[in-house]
Image (spheres, rainbow, N blue to C red):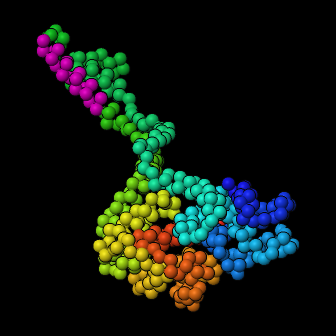
Amino acid sequence: MSEDVLLRFLGSGLIDVGGDDAKLEKLRLTASDLAGSLKKSSSKALAYALIAFDPHAPVEDPVVVDALAALKKRWATYVNTFSGPPVAVVRAMLLDALAQAAADDDRIGVAVVASARNALPFIEAGDEREIWADVVTEIEERVDARAETEWATPSSIAVPPMVFEVPELNAPTVTTSRAGRDYLKKEFRAAAGPQFQDPQRGNVATNGNPYWPGNNHIWVTEFGDRMAEAVAESIDAVVGKTRIEQADLSDPFRELAATVSSYVGNALNTVTAATAGLQRRTNLLWWRETLFSPTTRVSYRDLPPASAATLMAFDLHQQVPMFSPASVAAFLSEAVVGLPSIDQDKTYPMRELVAEAQAEAGLAVLRNAGAAVIGPPEGRGPFLALIAYPDVPVARAEAEFRRLTGVPPDAQLTLPGWASWVFRELQAARAAKEGSNAKRRTRRT
């Protein structure tokens, strides 16, 4: 899609380069330059998108001024081709640049899609609508596919088997002694008879068996008792001196324990990651049922209806990741409808909704969070810039509202629609900010 955006603008008669392919190539090169600038600083994505979508974008807007300066670097004599500042050409190049950058960075895609969902219904698109719709739809399909993946809960969770290499263990060391043969000979002889022929000492009294083998019955009994006692004493002596030194298993057991702990931890992380979408949905259902703000610790029922809807948008933004399905905004709308004080069909001027968000004490948390992700209003930007910087003079000036937001000050929204609008702006601002931060970290490393 990004390759034929400029051609489609040419084909629709929205821009004219007199059929000169060389001039078209200069526009393409400029669009690529703008895409490169956007990739380096994705925080520009919101302003780029809001200018690209608006046929009535002011020529003095900083984005338009910067884009014309980039065009002049590629085409120094462009002013001779157009009767005035070619804002339509700038917008076509910006849309081309957004498509290119979003193809490489889904965070820019989030910013583009969220801005489009808010702004396009309030813009008189005319012949451009089909071009925008195709570009935004292509980006939206890719971003939503990623969001659905991050929110999905698998039907089964695969955990790999634990791998543990059993270390080689040393066999136990057994230390023992031998039976005393001399002792056994002496005792065996004593068991056999009262005296015997000792080749070295002659007949020696042994204090042995008092009976001779001729007394068969008595001798055998005495012989058996003495033999048993001699053998038992010899065995006891050998066993008593036997020592078994076990192998040291402390290191293998510590290694096994560490492996098991790591495996269990990884398995739990796998289960947690796989069920994160389910847990998130469960938490959101609880939040919707309680109608209680987790950030300000107050019930939405205790706030003015418009402030409650705005705070609900912020609280939902705090609870969901950057990549969230389009259905999340619809969920928010239904949650706002659940407030007892809400008339879901009543509309409010958007300028008044912004003014209340600038002044309501209970929305200080939103204003602080907005100031952390977006700068003060200068040119075209989201409502969040006006809300986050209420003390900047232009932020409260009704005459500047159209220039800074692209929306007429009398344009109206229902409170469910307003909550969805604020939620999308917060998501877009976070995506653009995180994209820029990630690129700065990459450059530093």
Position of 312 with respect to 136 (left or right) is left
**To which quarter of the image does residue 296 belong?**
bottom left
Position of 329 with respect to 59 (left or right) is left
Check the image and report above or below for 232 versus 426. above
Viewer-nearest residue: 109 or 241? 109
Check the image and report above or below for 218 versus 28. above
* Picture quarter with the N terminus: bottom right
Viewer-nearest residue: 231 or 65? 65
> Which contiguous range is marked in magenta?
217-236
Q: Residue at x 46, y 83 (%)?
A: 352
Q: Residue at x 57, y 90 (%)?
A: 393
Q: Position of residue 360 (x, y in %)?
A: 42, 85
Viewer-nearest residue: 108 or 119? 119
Check the image and report above or below for 338 versus 365. above
Query: Is residue 228 on the magenta stretch?
Result: yes
Q: Position of residue 26 (x, y in %)?
A: 82, 64
Q: Position of residue 339 (x, y in %)?
A: 32, 71
Q: Residue at x 35, y 25 (%)?
A: 181
Query: Is residue 39 on the magenta stretch?
Result: no
Q: Position of residue 45 (x, y in %)?
A: 63, 69
Q: Main secondary structure of the magenta part?
A: helix
